[in-house]
Image (cartoon, rainbow, N blue to C red):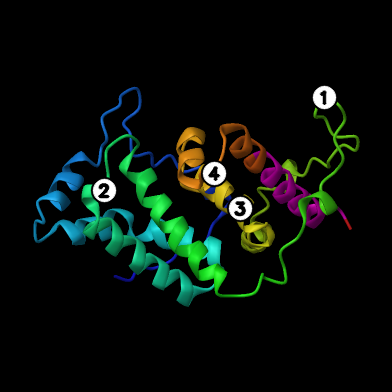
Amino acid sequence: MRSNGKDIGAEQFAGEHDRSLAPGTRVDVDAGLVEALRRDEPAAADQLVERYGDRVYRLALRITGVKEDAEEATQDALWTAARKINMFRGESAFGSWIYRITANAAYQKLRTRRPRANEIALDDVLPSLDGDGRHFEPMDDWSNRIDERTLQGELREVLTDAIDALPVDYRTALVLHDVEGVSNPDIAETLGISLPAVKSRVHRSRLFVRKRLSEYLKPA
């Protein structure tokens, strides 16, 4: 099962809201797909790939940073979801369950490789915070330049590079929240961390990405 990847653009970073639970309800919009998988219907696996293939690949690529590893993790995740569907209890959204499987498959790929050289320690680059969580040093406001047409392609590249430079745990939380539109509680369950830890990772990741964009857009 192979899916085509998609680059993260500025508009995606603002947030895609592809949630698996219908707003205001606890009815999983994937209930029909889940039942089809449980019944082992012939078209169910194809429906799974069509609905989640791109999103699973996108997450796997952001975690591994290598297309080949992302493709293998995607295949592993979708195969596992289809073959082990009876392990899904419906206690969370089906999409969150898929993302959890994907993250595990992608992390497994990372364990076989050395850490990526371009990853940074956030404490080394983020501005200091005071006791109230505010920055000691204000960050530049570059929003008035964001719409300049000549910068759009370059911004996309800078944005992607900034996200890729994040430590994998922070990168995963940011992509799940701001690109895939997964809720904080579902991210916490997916990654096996506390809700405050999710909020911290997303917040600090956003600060780092914004800092990179601010440095890029700073007047010469």
Determine whether, in the image, residue 81 is placed left or right of residue 200.
Answer: left
Answer whether residue 218 is visible to the viewer in this image.
Answer: no
Task: Name the residue tied to disc 2.
Answer: 87
Q: Quadrant of the N terminus?
A: bottom left
Q: Nearer the viewer, mark 4 or mark 2?
A: 2
Q: Are marks 1 and 3 in contact (CB under 8 Å)?
A: no
Query: Residue 189 placed where, x, y %?
Result: 46, 40
User: Helix, strand or loop at disc 1?
Assistant: loop
User: Helix, strand or loop at disc 2?
Assistant: helix
How many residues crowd mark 2 within 10 Å: few (<14), some (14–19), many (20+)? Answer: few
Q: Nearer the viewer, mark 4 or mark 1?
A: 1
Query: Residue 159 placed where, x, y %?
Result: 65, 57
The residue stretch that appears in magenta: 203-219
Task: Name the residue tied to disc 3.
Answer: 169
Give the number of marks.
4
Which one is earlier in the sequence, the residue at label 2 or at label 3? 2
Identify which residue is drawn at 34% across, 22% down: 24
73 above or below 100? Answer: below
Q: What is the distance, in whole Å, between disc 1 and disc 3 at their CAs?
A: 25 Å
